[in-house]
Image (spheres, rainbow, N blue to C red):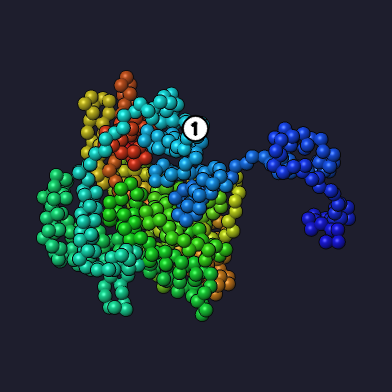
Amino acid sequence: FKGLTPYLPLQAMDELAKCERVEMPRIPAPFWPEGEEKAREWLETDEKVRKLRSMGAWSDLNDRIAGFSPYFRSVEHSAQIKGSLLTRREKAFKEGRINLLSCSTTMEMGVDIGGLSAVAMNNVPPHPANFLQRAGRAGRRGETSALSFTLCKSTPQGEAVFNNPLWAFTTALSVPQVALQSGRIIQRHVNALSLTQFLVQNTNDEVFKLNCGWFFNTDEAEMRSSPSLRFQEWCREGMAESQLKQNVDWLCHGSSLAGIPADQLLTESAMAMERLAGLWKEEYSALEANLEEVKTRQGNSRPEKAIRMQLERLEKEYLLAELATRGFLPGYGFPTGVVSLLTSTMETIGRNTTQQREDNRVLSRGSPSRPIAQALRDYAPGTDTTLDGRVYRSAGVTLNWHLPAAIEGGQEIQALRWVWRCHECGGTGTRPYRPEQCPHCGENDPEKLSRNEYLEPAGFAVDIRDKTHGNVNTQQYLPVRDPLISVQGAVWMSLPNPTLGHYRSTGNGHIFHRSDGLHGLGYSLCLRCGRSESLGYDGNHPRTMDGHKRLRGGRDNDREQHCPGNDEPGAIKDGLLLGASLYTDIFELQLCEPETGNAISPFQAYSIAVVLRRALCRSIGIEQDEIGIHTEASRGPKGESARSIFL
């Protein structure tokens, strides 16, 4: 405008403000039919280009554009992307408008791209079948050449494959087996059988809804109890047909539940459904309470819309996927204990209305999700997550309980628990109260008994006011903490040669996964809105929590000055850990050096753990990522120093 540039520095001078008119060169021919050499010659010899280059008005980017350089257009192809968008990307890839896909394991099976000339893997797949499925994507349409390229990381699996590139072609594939000794898995099949029969007999055409809102919520309009309540009564009161009970007996034949009366197993199904329905209703009621907190007269503020969107997603979640995720139905490899990262912000609310695939467990209720043990690492407050080229920063947790009417007066917030670790006997566990001494050995020395208060989050969330960006070079991650593992109560058994070591196992072992912030001192967390921030390196309360606004939006279309938790004593907790308790089958092995009798080294222990896991997976026919491994310094049966290997 008037020969002035809009790109002015703060201290502008006349010579910087006035534009200089230049003449841009005209490319002799479109697309350079005579080849790249002609393009390079023109770029080096054209007088106008040389003059502009000397002025700094012609850059290497201009060279690439004028020379019509080949380029890659890359996009993400993973289960985090909506199904409709994945379909469009696959179509564009086949048409050549996208020529590089960055894929997760979703590309292994069920997707036929065609026309692929190269497949690059950034790590060694866990199983030969995975490798063959991925590598086999290239060269399926008669391409003149096809390449598979694998990066082998410095891990036992990666180095073994690097030393034996024919691994995928020479390894015999394990025959799948059916294990009948797990009571939990058999009970889930009993649950599936009984739920199927109930839905067929008692729901008529309603069964086609199969969403969580229909199944768990009471139909007040028709004065009917929810299908989940009717299912519980149906199981407990023996209303199932005798044929179903006979089928339950047949199902359990030869398993660890054989001989248990069918009525007792159906009662277990009712109890499991009661627990699951309670958890779902707690989450739903908490969202309703949050909606009441930010309600406006108009009823259409951004925070209200965000919460209503969560309520709608919660109600419309596919029922069978939710039941499998919660451990009521067989999961068939789907992760359980899944939590989500809420990524919706004020600038994105209302954009995403596309339905997701019902079997997609990487997206839950429209948001990216992880098993909670992994989410504590990937979604912890302060970490960045990249989703389809955009970076989202987690700013807190979602809360799934009702706050008391007043926090004053020393009332304790429910869902806060204590985790303890005894360095004398190696025991660990969780309690709803602060333990005064180790429940296993009685140790009460604060130097030997660590105790921390923690909260198990229902999920994680970004700040509703956050602006996403695409800079993936400065992402923030938090340190990963090893889990606390306990096999207390299991009986030690000696190896055939007792001097070499001993082992024990349990079907009810305890694992505690945790996140303790950027500096290992915990978080400052608002129990009113869920906003959270790591404590400083000196343990001080973070200033960003003072006068903070609600994580997911405040009253009056977010015109509220700050979160009410700022004014309520006890609403903001400092030094809190985020954690989750899991109970599963655990095997513990302690080995000694044959010559000295001393505990083996950490390096030896981890190498042996990797080998044992591989052997176990081959034996029972499952993939290695289904079994976790861990090693740590511990105590032996007589209190001696040892090194434990856990599977």
Residue ID at (30%, 35%):
617
The residue most toward the top is: 595
In the rendered view, does 380 fall on the left or right side of 335? right
Residue ID at (42%, 47%):
374
> Dot 1 corresponds to which residue?
146
Q: Image quarter for residue 368?
A: bottom left
- Horizontal and vertical percent position of residue 362: 42, 51
The residue most toward the bottom is: 297
Number of residues whose C-alpha sits closer than 10 Å to that of mark 1, classed few (under 14), some (14–19) or many (20 or more): some
Instruction: Give above or below for 539 relative to 608.
Output: below
Number of marks in picture:
1
> In the depicted view, which residue is nearer to us: 432 or 302?
302
Q: Secondary structure at mark 1?
A: loop
**What amino acid type should be assigned to the residue bearing mark 1?**
Ala
Q: Is residue 511 visible?
A: yes
Viewport quadrant of the N terminus: bottom right
Q: Is residue 432 visible?
A: no
Q: Image quarter for residue 33?
A: top right
- Horizontal and vertical percent position of residue 177: 24, 39
In the rendered view, does 589 fall on the left or right side of 81? left
Viewport quadrant of the C terminus: top left
Residue ID at (54%, 42%):
100
